[in-house]
Amino acid sequence: MDFKTAVTTCFNKYATFEGRARRSEYWWWFLFLLLSNLVLGLLDGALFGENTAILGPLFSLAVFLPSLAVGARRLHDTGRSGWWLLLGLIPLVGFLVLLFFFVQPGDEATNEYGPPPRS
């Protein structure tokens, strides 16, 4: 899956928490969020001054549900429930555990969350 396909898929499955997502879909989405937040942060600084952020927070609000959804689908691909995303609420340790889960390869066979995603 390439960058454009991954971003399109995540927006098309805006609040779809069912199914599975490949590693490439998740990490391309992560790169999209990183680059978008960087550009919008620079635009906020240029347009509104250093202490005012408008575009970045609005974008973050708009992509909050798709980010949760692709995270849950990524966990489903590894055979875990989407509820594991709540580990992110634990400072540092939760992030590290989720990072470990997200980098693992997905199940090659059908699991309780459906068949493996197609390439």
Image (cartoon, rainbow, N blue to C red):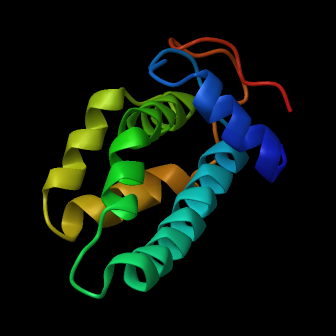
Exactly how many numbered labels are in the figure?
0
Name the spot of residue 27 as percent of width and height, x first: 62, 55
Location of residue 61 (image quadrant): top left
Q: In the figure, is residue 81 to the left or right of 36?
A: left
Whether residue 107 appears in this view of the structure is no
* Direction bottom: furthest residue: 50
Name the spot of residue 64 as percent of width and height, x first: 36, 41
Report the residue at 55% width, 73% height from top: 39
Q: In the figure, is residue 60 to the left or right of 29?
A: left
Q: Compared to 82, does 1 lie above or below?
A: below
Q: Compared to 16, does 68 lie above or below?
A: below
Q: Nearer the viewer, residue 32 or 55?
A: 55
Whether residue 26 appears in this view of the structure is yes
* Direction front: furthest residue: 47
Name the spot of residue 103 as percent of width and height, x first: 56, 57
Report the residue at 48% width, 81% height from top: 42
Report the residue at 23% width, 59% height from top: 94
Report the residue at 50% width, 51% height from top: 102
